[in-house]
Amino acid sequence: MWVILGLIAIVATFINLYMFTAGKDYKLAMAMGLSFTALTLCAEYSLVSRWVNVEDWAALSDVVPGMQRALWLLTIISILLNIAPILLELKNKK
């Protein structure tokens, strides 16, 4: 599930950037990109929670260390890409 939500977040982010460059209202796409990023993180947390409930320590020790870094990095990139149009608008107004 987290993969699907992550892909939707990526698509929404690119729609956000496209709409900004086309001069259209991009704020809904920005909200969708950030919302699906949050849902992706929640889905990943649910997956890890299931592994803890069934005591699948091998899955936890194999996946969590690498995914933790990837999720931090991709979340930061998503936030920066989604708010970039707002920052560019502020810069252009000055």
Image (cartoon, rainbow, N blue to C red):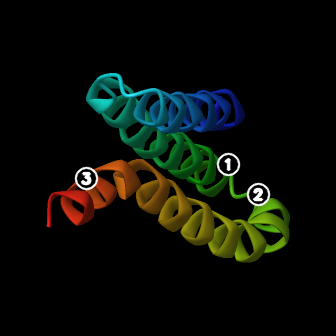
**Left or right: 38, with 57 as reference point:** left
Q: Residue at x 58, y 35 (%)?
A: 14
Residue 50 drawn at (x, y percent): 60, 45
- Whole-number angstrom distance, CA of label 3 to CA of label 1: 49 Å
Residue type, label 2: Asp
Residue 79 sits in quarter: bottom left
Instruction: Identify the residue position indicated by label 3 in the image.
Output: 89
Q: Are marks 2 and 1 in contact (CB under 8 Å)?
A: yes
| Front label number (3 vs 2) | 3
Residue type, label 3: Glu
The numbered mark, 3 or 2, whose residue comes first in the sequence reads 2
Residue 87 drawn at (x, y percent): 29, 61
Residue type, label 1: Val
- Whole-number angstrom distance, CA of label 2 to CA of label 1: 6 Å
Instruction: Identify the residue position indicated by label 1 in the image.
Output: 54
* Label 2 packing within 10 angstroms: few (<14), some (14-19), many (20+): few
